[in-house]
Image (spheres, rainbow, N blue to C red):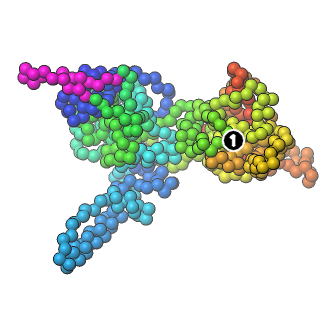
């Protein structure tokens, strides 16, 4: 990661206006990065348009050219009338200019938009940090970190560019040295690609999820300068701010110095610009990114009906499916995501008791929270819409005795609750209990990896049933099995969580 301070001194002396940016990439350091997947290209206009169409989110304002023209005409007409009225009254009218972005912000919901045909394969731009996080969450993915970017572009080397040290204007990437002041369709530079990943230098800046903080052993730079016989010392500080996010890769507006791998551009999260886009990434562990996004942005820890609950996202279990379509980019791995669905369970980190009897005793007064579910599809039994729910467990046993003025616990009143059997409870993320359903037996056992499997409905032998003992409804089962650590070293509690679904809700296309 980064650059040796001596390597950036010349850059700073040549361009002191950007000295603080160059200083932020020092010193040269190392980072360990877990295996990950990375988007082969920057996200294009046609890829982002699929997200806009699916969610009704605000499109970039440049897509509303026809509506903007109409808005501009109406604005100019109104200004003309104001000017006439002011002149008639002997007053002066201060002319205003049409602000396209402000007009779009106010009027986009009723406006027409479309991606220009010749821009479909260009990277999407004018997207804020919030915009790109929303796309990534919808697509079942995430943003890359700056460390992942450096790993993809640089590997274990310290090369300046993804392709090496050589520079030739217009050969490897789209920078200010290109033929035009604009982005190009993604994957336009085969020779500049590395390991099947395109445009890791130039074209447009790319958002990362990394805060702008210093590398280890960072020190402000002290550069000795000389003017005639006089010697001076130039002190350059980076101005780190963890509220900012790091942009990487440079853009078509940067010189060869700006598209170097170690360049880190600190940027406000509400920034959008004509040369700022993004690409997506994914952790190799299925469910990790999805669970992390939910714990960060959906789960309200204050509403959990239990103290000190934490979730272990690395142990999440998921079945998921992407739907995609072909696009206009001829590059390996390029598709337009049209939707993503998930059926996810994430367990708590630990249950602070040492054996099953203690767990049963703990659960009698109130269900023990053991994780959360996030379902794109509805459950069939119990009948519940898709969504994100906290999962609790209670052992069979009498209801706790209440004091005279003590209110009845809300969980005892939900549909499906039976005191005489072990049950699971589902709570909405605001802590409201929604439904209960029977739980298979819980067991003490050694820790082992969890599983999630689809069990399609198999019609039973109907001769074994009659009117008084009817056959079970024809439902598929999505079965999660998992072990949650207890206070005993290397041991935990084994749970079997069957989710009943209408046949075909989840099929073999879900991975």
Would you place residue 463 above or below residue 357 in this image? Answer: below
Q: How many marks?
A: 1
Question: What is the magenta range?
Answer: 218-236
Image location (x, y in percent) of residue 464: 91, 45
Quadrant in which the N terminus is drawn:
top left
Between 508 and 491, which is closer to the camera in this rendering? 491
Image location (x, y in percent) of residue 271: 35, 46
Report the side of 7 relative to 215 (left or right).
left
Would you place residue 152 above or below residue 123 in this image? Answer: above
Residue 226 magenta: yes
Would you place residue 328 above or below residue 353 in this image? Answer: below
Residue 308 magenta: no
Overall secondary structure of the magenta section: strand
Q: Can residue 285 be seen in this view?
A: yes
Quadrant in which the C terminus is drawn:
top right
Local packing at callout 1 (Cα closer than 10 Å; few below 14, some 14-19, many 20+) is: many
| Residue in the picture at 64% in, 50% down | 386
Q: Is mark 1 on a helix, strand or loop?
A: strand
| Residue in the picture at 24% in, 34% down | 18
- Determine which quarter of the picture holds residue 269: top left
| Residue in the picture at 20% in, 78% down | 89
Q: Which residue in the rendered view is the most extreme toward the left? A: 228
Image location (x, y in percent) of residue 138: 52, 47
Q: Is residue 331 visible?
A: no
Q: Mark 1 points at which residue?
A: 391
Image location (x, y in percent) of residue 235: 23, 26
Report the side of 111 relative to 35 (left or right).
left
Would you place residue 143 above or below residue 165 in this image? Answer: below
Between 212 and 387, which is closer to the camera in this rendering? 212
- Determine which quarter of the picture holds residue 260: top left
| Residue in the picture at 80% in, 45% down | 403
Report the side of 133 relative to 417 (left or right).
left
């Amino acid at each position: 990661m980064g650059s040796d301070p001596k390597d950036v001194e010349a850059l700073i002396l040549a361009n002191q206006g950007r000295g603080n940016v160059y200083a932020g990439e020092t010193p040269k350091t190392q980072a360990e990065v877990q295996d990950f997947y990375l988007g082969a290209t920057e996200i294009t206009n046609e890829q982002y348009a699929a997200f806009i169409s699916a969610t009704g989110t605000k499109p970039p304002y440049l897509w509303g050219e026809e509506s903007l023209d109409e808005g501009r005409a109406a604005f100019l007409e109104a200004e003309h009338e104001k000017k006439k009225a002011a002149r008639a009254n002997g007053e002066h009218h201060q002319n205003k200019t049409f602000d396209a972005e402000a007009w779009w912000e106010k009027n986009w919901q009723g406006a027409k938009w479309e991606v220009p045909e010749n821009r479909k394969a260009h990277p999407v731009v004018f997207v804020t940090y919030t915009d790109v996080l929303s796309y990534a969450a919808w697509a079942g993915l995430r943003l890359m970190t700056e460390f992942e970017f450096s790993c993809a572009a640089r590997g274990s080397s310290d090369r300046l560019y993804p392709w090496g040290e050589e520079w030739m204007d217009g050969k490897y990437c789209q920078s200010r040295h290109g033929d035009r002041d604009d982005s190009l369709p993604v994957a336009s530079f085969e020779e500049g690609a590395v390991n099947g990943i395109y445009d890791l230098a130039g074209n447009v800046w790319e958002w990362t999820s990394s805060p702008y903080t210093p590398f280890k052993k960072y020190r402000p730079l002290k550069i000795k300068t000389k003017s005639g016989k006089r010697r001076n010392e130039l002190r350059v500080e980076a101005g780190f701010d963890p509220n900012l996010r790091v942009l990487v890769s440079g853009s078509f507006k940067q010189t060869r110095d700006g598209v170097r791998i170690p360049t880190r551009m600190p940027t406000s999260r509400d920034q959008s610009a004509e040369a700022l886009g993004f690409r997506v990434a994914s952790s190799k562990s299925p469910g990790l990114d999805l669970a992390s996004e939910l714990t960060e942005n959906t789960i309200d820890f204050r509403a959990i009906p239990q103290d000190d609950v934490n979730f272990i996202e690395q142990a999440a279990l998921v079945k998921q499916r992407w739907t995609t379509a072909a696009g206009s980019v001829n590059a390996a791995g390029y598709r337009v995501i049209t939707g993503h669905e998930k059926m996810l369970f994430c367990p708590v980190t630990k249950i602070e008791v040492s054996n099953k009897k203690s767990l049963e005793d703990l659960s009698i007064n109130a269900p023990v929270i053991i994780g959360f579910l996030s379902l794109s599809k509805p459950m069939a039994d119990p009948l519940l819409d898709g969504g994100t729910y906290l999962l609790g467990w209670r052992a069979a046993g009498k209801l706790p005795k209440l004091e005279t003025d003590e209110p009845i616990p809300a969980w005892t009143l939900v549909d499906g609750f039976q005191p005489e059997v072990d049950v699971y409870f589902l709570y909405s993320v605001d802590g409201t209990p929604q439904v209960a359903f029977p739980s298979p037996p819980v067991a003490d056992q050694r820790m082992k990896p969890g599983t999630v499997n689809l069990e399609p409905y198999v019609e039973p032998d109907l001769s074994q049933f009659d009117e008084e003992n009817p056959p079970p409804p024809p439902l598929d089962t999505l079965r999660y099995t998992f072990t949650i650590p207890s206070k005993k070293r290397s041991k935990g509690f084994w749970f079997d969580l069957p989710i009943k679904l209408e046949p075909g809700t989840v099929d073999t296309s879900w991975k």
